[in-house]
């Protein structure tokens, strides 16, 4: 458990910051980073098996998924840190209780209630290295009485961006690693791209540096001049490229600014009936900057300064004249819940609630390349280097992601039956989830007329009805058995039922031995099912090309390949098995030690069939079989060995993922 005091004492600005210290999160989670539509997002990744397989709850109810992450994975950045009372962590499979996504565990963020008084906090932070300065301010107020309480929280946070060039491990570099006197793009550089001013020889098909590459290197920041291409790319290679050090222009961590308001109340309307409600509104702004648009230029006209030939040619260019790209993301989230709870006949504890969340995320991209503007300039003899020419080519992109989430819940707990250890506890519940997801791109991006960006709109909806039962059996005073079963019925991917079983044995007051076995599942996100085709410049290693050029496979380097990614409407839920065995010992004063062995296996994993997978299949001689099984895939070479069109990939069930390990935690309380 992590309390608000723990977060404050450790200088943690957000829920995601606080969770970075968890041993179960040692594989890492995402934090706001520059360069993608998810730069304002933060997630948790217990056991390292994917953030979509860790469920996040807010006061025990599912947190609505981020529309920028496909509509299922929760964005921790939407939770105001000052409103947090504590964070509870369940490192165990819990799908039998909570449903989809609880494969690796559950994070339950408990918000402040019953607060009395007024509290104001302000802080400033500056790292030893440049960038990432922080500012925080929060205000909390509340009143309470015998009948109820009301709490109000305002939270403000700011964190400055960190440029790649500010850190040695992310800045661009060129080092002759093998000492052959040649700097090779593929083998000897970091943060440098072929997308600078690189043209393709119309006769040999090899890449060449533009005739003005040296001039650009001398006058335009970012250009590093002509360098060897290194490993052949797609069977067509050799020669050299005009490199561009994009890592000296881009930001690694985006700047963030968060404002959130939360108010909650509870009131006893009858002796055995209480009403409770919560309203939360948050706005997150994030700005990231990265290098000017990298985009292909087909049809470089004869006579252009980059074209030394008497025919039109192609090339890979950095459109530096437009300026660095910038992405401003504005996330708005509304979250409301109202419910009733109470006792019936002094023996049944019941609760009903309605929860609604609406997430609107806006992504505005500035200074992208407009292909329409480029070809307008060429058709009208407008110089690309003039203010008019650059203005014609500069384009602003826009994407709106939305997720509307409705949740109805009803549950009741009661005691029925008795064992030697005490009364048998039961809990039954039903709930219904409705999700409406959409991702809408501007028309220029959808038409493929934007250089340095890509995307297509998608939308879908889902309804899920669930029924669950839990039982706790105190067999003796030392042995406690518990079990649960949940059945989910989805409107789009079918039905699934999963059980869980747990045992706790306490042979002495200071020692607890525990074990669990559970089944779990994760329903594919609406984005995975219904997303439209999208474009990616994907890194992969072409072993067939290396073999054809007698290049040793261990020296075969990565290169970028144009890649179209398709969704798969036939995906089915992933399934999992989780086993845990652990001990808790607290026999030493002020010290508690917990040791757990865990084993989790996920089957039918929704996994991408990547460009690298296709290259492996080709190298292993099974490409034809793979293409036959997946007709949507496309992977073809021309007679020269170059790829004849964009490589098309998709995703499917079938992979297996697993984790086995030990989790050791020790908590020592110090005394003043």
Image (cartoon, rainbow, N blue to C red):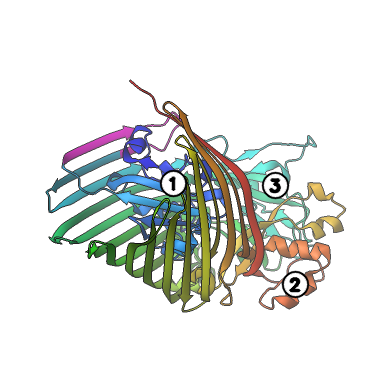
| Earlier-in-chain disc, 1 versus 3 | 3
Q: Residue visible at 34% across and 52% down?
A: 79
Foreground label between 3 and 2: 2
Mark in front: 1 vs 3: 1
538 within the magenta span: no
Q: Crowding near pointer 3: few (<14 within 10 Å), some, many (20+)?
A: many
Structural distance between the alpha carbons of marks 3 and 2: 32 Å
Contact between labelled residues 1 and 2, with CB atoms less than 8 Å apart? no
> Residue at the spot x=45%, y=41% of the render?
162
User: Does residue 328 sit above or below 14 in this rendering?
Assistant: below
Q: Residue at x 35, y 32 (%)?
A: 9
- In which quarter of the view is residue 304 placed? bottom right
Cα distance, mark 2 to mark 1?
58 Å
Quadrant location of the C terminus in the rendered image? top left
Which residue is disc 1 drawn over? 477
Reading the image, the residue beneath label 3 is 185
Residue at disc 2, secondary structure: helix
x, y percent for residue 394: 45, 61
Q: Earlier in the sequence, mark 3 or mark 2?
A: 3
The residue under label 2 is 626
Q: Position of residue 328 (x, y in %)?
A: 38, 55
Residue 643 appears in which quarter of the rendering?
A: bottom right
C-alpha span from label 1 to label 3: 68 Å
Drawn side of residue 561 relative to residue 319, left or right: right
Q: Secondary structure at mark 1?
A: loop
Q: Which residues are magenta?
A: 117-135
Q: Is residue 200 above or below residue 461?
A: above
Extreme residue toward the top, this view: 672
Q: Residues within 10 Å of mark 1 (few under 14, many from 20)?
A: few
């Amino acid at each position: 458990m992590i309390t608000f005091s723990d977060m404050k004492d450790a200088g943690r600005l957000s829920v995601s910051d606080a969770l970075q210290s968890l041993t179960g999160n040692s594989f890492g989670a995402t934090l706001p980073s520059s360069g993608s539509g998810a730069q304002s997002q933060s997630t948790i990744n217990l056991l390292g098996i994917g953030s979509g397989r860790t469920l996040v709850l807010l006061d025990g109810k599912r947190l609505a998924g981020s529309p920028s992450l496909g509509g299922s994975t929760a964005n921790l950045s939407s939770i105001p840190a000052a409103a947090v009372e504590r964070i509870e962590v369940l490192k165990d499979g819990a799908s039998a209780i909570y449903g989809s996504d609880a494969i690796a565990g559950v994070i339950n963020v408990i918000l402040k209630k019953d607060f009395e008084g007024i509290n104001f906090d302000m802080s400033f932070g500056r790292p030893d290295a440049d960038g990432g300065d922080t500012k925080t301010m929060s205000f909390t107020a509340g009143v309470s009485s015998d009948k109820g309480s009301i709490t109000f929280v305002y939270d403000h946070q700011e964190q400055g961006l960190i440029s790649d060039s500010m850190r040695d491990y992310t800045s661009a570099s060129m080092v002759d690693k093998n000492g052959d006197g040649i700097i090779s793009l593929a083998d000897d550089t970091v943060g440098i791209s072929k997308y600078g001013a690189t043209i393709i020889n119309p006769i040999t098909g090899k890449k060449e540096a533009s005739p003005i590459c040296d001039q650009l290197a001398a006058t335009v920041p970012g250009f590093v001049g002509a360098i060897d291409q290194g490993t052949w790319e797609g069977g067509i290679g050799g020669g050299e490229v005009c490199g561009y050090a994009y890592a000296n222009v881009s930001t690694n961590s985006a700047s963030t600014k968060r404002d959130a308001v939360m108010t909650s109340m509870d009131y006893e309307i009858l002796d055995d009936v209480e009403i409770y409600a919560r309203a939360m509104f948050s706005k997150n702004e994030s700005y990231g900057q990265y290098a000017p648009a990298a985009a292909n230029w087909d049809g470089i006209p004869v006579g252009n300064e980059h074209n030394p030939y008497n025919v039109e040619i192609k090339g890979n260019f950095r459109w530096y004249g437009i300026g660095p790209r910038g992405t401003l993301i504005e996330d708005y989230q509304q979250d409301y819940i109202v419910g009733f709870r109470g006792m019936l006949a002094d023996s049944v504890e019941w609760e009903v609630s309605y929860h609604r969340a609406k997430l609107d995320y806006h992504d505005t991209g500035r200074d992208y390349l407009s292909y329409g503007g480029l070809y307008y300039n060429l058709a009208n003899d407008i110089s690309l280097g003039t203010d008019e020419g650059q203005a014609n080519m500069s384009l602003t992109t826009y994407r709106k992601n939305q997720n509307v989430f409705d949740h109805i819940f009803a549950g009741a707990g009661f005691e029925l039956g008795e064992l030697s250890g005490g009364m048998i506890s039961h809990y039954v519940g039903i709930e219904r989830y409705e999700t409406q997801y959409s991702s809408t791109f501007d028309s220029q991006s959808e038409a493929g007329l934007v250089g340095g960006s890509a995307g297509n709109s998608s939308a879908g909806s889902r309804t899920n009805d669930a029924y669950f039962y839990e039982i706790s059996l105190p067999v003796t005073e030392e042995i406690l058995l518990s079990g649960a079963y949940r059945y989910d019925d989805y409107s789009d991917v079918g039905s699934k039922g999963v059980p869980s079983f747990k045992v706790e044995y306490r042979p002495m007051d200071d020692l607890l031995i525990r074990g669990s076995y559970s089944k779990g599942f994760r329903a594919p996100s609406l984005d995975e099912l219904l997303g439209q085709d999208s474009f990616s410049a994907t890194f992969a290693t072409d072993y067939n090309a290396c073999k054809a050029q007698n290049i040793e496979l261990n020296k075969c380097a990565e290169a970028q390949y144009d890649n179209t990614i398709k969704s798969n409407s036939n995906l089915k839920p992933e399934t999992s098995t989780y086993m845990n065995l652990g001990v808790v010992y607290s026999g030493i004063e002020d010290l508690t030690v917990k040791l757990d062995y865990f084993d989790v296996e996920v089957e039918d994993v929704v996994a991408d069939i990547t460009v690298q997978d296709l290259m492996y299949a080709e190298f292993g001689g099974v490409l034809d079989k793979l293409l036959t099984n997946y007709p949507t895939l496309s992977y073809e070479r021309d007679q020269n060995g170059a790829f004849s069109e964009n490589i098309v990939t998709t995703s499917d069930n079938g992979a297996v993922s697993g984790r086995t390990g030990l989790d050791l935690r020790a908590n020592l309380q110090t005394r003043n």
